[in-house]
Amino acid sequence: MKNNKDFSNQDLQNKDFSGQDLSGANFSGANLEYANFSGATLFFCNFSKANLRYANFSGADLWKSDLEYANLYRSILYRANLSGATLYRAILENADLKFANLQGANLSEANLKNADFSDAILIDTIQ
């Protein structure tokens, strides 16, 4: 984990984090509505209970990140790496997960209503 930045409970609406390495950062409880994380490296990040509505994670690497109870309504996770991530009770309603890697991810009790998993890797996911 390269840096341990603490963004917990902050209002970071519309913030641009694209392409940044924020591995190990704590975003728990933060308001990240419409935030841009495209192409970002986010290993072991904590997004639990964060508001990620409409956030853009296209091509982001969220390996082993914690997204428990996160609100990802209509978020873009196109080609994102979510392998080993925890999405327990996360809201993924209407999310774009096309071509996403969810290998070994925990999706138990998540709201997946109308989420698009076209061509996503779902090997060993927990549902």
Image (tube, rainbow, N blue to C red):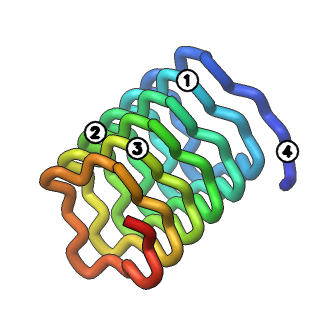
First of labels 4, 1 by sequence position: 4
Q: Nearer the viewer, residue 19 or 77?
A: 77
Location of mark 2 (residue): 73
Question: How far is disc 3 from disc 2 in space, using C-alphas?
Answer: 12 Å
Q: How many numbered tags mark residues here?
A: 4
Q: Label for residue 112?
A: none
Label 2 crowd (10 A; few <14 / some 14-19 / many >=20): many
First of labels 1, 3 by sequence position: 1
- Residue 46 % position (x, y): 65, 41
Q: Label for residue 89?
A: 3
Location of mark 1 (residue): 30
First of labels 2, 1 by sequence position: 1
Q: Nearer the viewer, residue 91 or 72?
A: 91
**As drawn, 68 above or below 117:** above
Please tell me which residue is depicted at 79% across the width and 34% down the height of the picture: 5
Location of mark 4 (residue): 3
Question: How far is disc 4 from disc 2 in space, using C-alphas?
Answer: 28 Å
First of labels 3, 2 by sequence position: 2
> Identity of the amino acid at label 3?
Arg
